[in-house]
Image: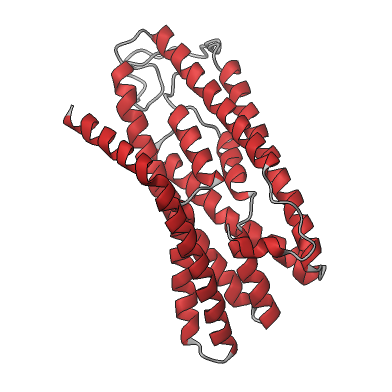
């Protein structure tokens, strides 16, 4: 009871000061942008101590970027709060998705700026298409979650291939064995598949960070793209660790709430699980619509790059 009261007070306090906190995060990110550019200039002037500060500042930027508003946090929170995943998956999938976001930014700049040598205006237009496409991918992933939840609501037919007398199979029973011991025949207790996990990773990582793109473009203009790549991946690592921490908190809260419903009948639990998954899918679709309609318009001068993430 005391924990619930403390949690409620923490939520109320965070809600009251959330706007000011987000503004602070954004202002710090803008300041870090300027420092990262300064460190790149120091490297250009053979002051290689700037490289250490570049990587340190990139990591801090990635952590603050994960704390502020963003699509990755919404996807992770929505998916993990409405789907029962193993602790390993709930940490590994957001981590890999955040790292993929850095790789996406590198691929974006390398293909369009390095190989094709496009101008700032062309990059801005390409960014517009990429962000539109990423919103569509998030919406498609939401529809996939709903489709998979509805299809999986009807239990699969049990097929018995062989019968082994008890005590002769050599099988060790536990809560995770999936053989029917204590939790029903063939029920594994987990929701995800490799396709679902890949969908979460792609939904998070398909949208490159504008701050990462800016660092890569500037480092490429100065002639040392390698430092830009290292800075972007360090930035992605900071984001990944922060989002992984968020996933731990979401999983802990989901499991704690789930224990309150253990006394319900299996039928009610299945209906509740279906409802949660459908609601999660609908939220992802609505979020994708908001992203699709609010993409920053194309700028002829590529000024979007200076807008931050």
Quadrant for residue 172, please give it. Answer: top left
Give the residue at x 61% y 38%: 199
How many numbered marks are there? 0
Q: Is 105 on the left-hand or right-hand side of 71?
A: right
Quadrant for residue 91, please give it. Answer: top left
Q: Nearer the viewer, residue 108 or 263?
A: 108
Give the residue at x 41% y 35%: 86
Give the residue at x 29% y 12%: 263
Residue 283 sits above or below residue 303 on the image: above
Q: Is 68 on the left-hand or right-hand side of 14?
A: right
Report the residue that reaches farthest toward the bottom. Answer: 46
Residue 209 locus on image (x, y percent): 60, 57
Residue 81 sits above or below residue 263 on the image: below
Give the residue at x 49% y 63%: 29
Residue 138 locus on image (x, y percent): 63, 38
From where the camera sits, is residue 172 visible? no
Q: Nearer the viewer, residue 84 or 167?
A: 84
Residue 196 locus on image (x, y percent): 57, 34
Residue 3 locus on image (x, y percent): 20, 33
For the N terminus, the quadrant is top left
């Amino acid at each position: 009871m005391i924990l619930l009261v403390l949690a409620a007070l923490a939520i109320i306090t965070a809600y009251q000061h959330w706007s000011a906190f987000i503004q602070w995060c954004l202002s710090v990110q803008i300041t870090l942008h300027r420092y990262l550019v300064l460190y790149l200039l120091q490297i250009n002037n053979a002051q290689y101590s700037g490289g250490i500060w570049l990587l340190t500042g990139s990591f801090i930027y990635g952590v603050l970027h994960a704390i502020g508003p963003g699509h990755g946090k919404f996807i992770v929170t929505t998916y993990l709060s409405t789907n029962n995943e193993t602790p390993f998956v709930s940490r590994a999938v957001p981590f890999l998705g955040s790292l993929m976001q850095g790789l996406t930014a590198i691929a974006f700049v390398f293909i369009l700026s390095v190989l094709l040598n496009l101008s700032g205006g062309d990059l801005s237009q390409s960014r517009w298409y990429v962000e539109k496409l990423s919103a569509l991918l998030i919406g498609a992933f939401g529809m996939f979650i709903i489709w998979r939840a509805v299809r999986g609501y009807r239990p699969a037919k049990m097929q018995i291939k062989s019968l082994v007398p008890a005590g002769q199979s050599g099988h060790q029973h536990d809560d995770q064995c999936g053989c029917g011991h204590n939790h029903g025949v063939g029920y594994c207790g987990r929701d995800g598949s490799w396709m679902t996990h890949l969908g979460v990773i792609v939904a998070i990582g398909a949208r490159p960070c504008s701050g990462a793109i800016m660092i890569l473009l500037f480092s490429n203009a100065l002639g040392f793209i390698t430092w830009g790549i290292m800075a972007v991946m360090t930035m992605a690592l900071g984001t990944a660790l922060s989002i992984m921490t968020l996933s731990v908190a979401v999983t802990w809260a989901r499991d704690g709430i789930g224990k309150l419903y253990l006394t319900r009948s299996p039928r009610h639990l299945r209906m509740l699980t279906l409802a949660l998954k459908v609601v999660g899918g609908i939220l992802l679709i609505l979020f994708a619509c908001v992203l699709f309609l609010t993409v920053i318009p194309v700028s002829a001068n590529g000024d979007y790059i200076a807008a931050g993430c």
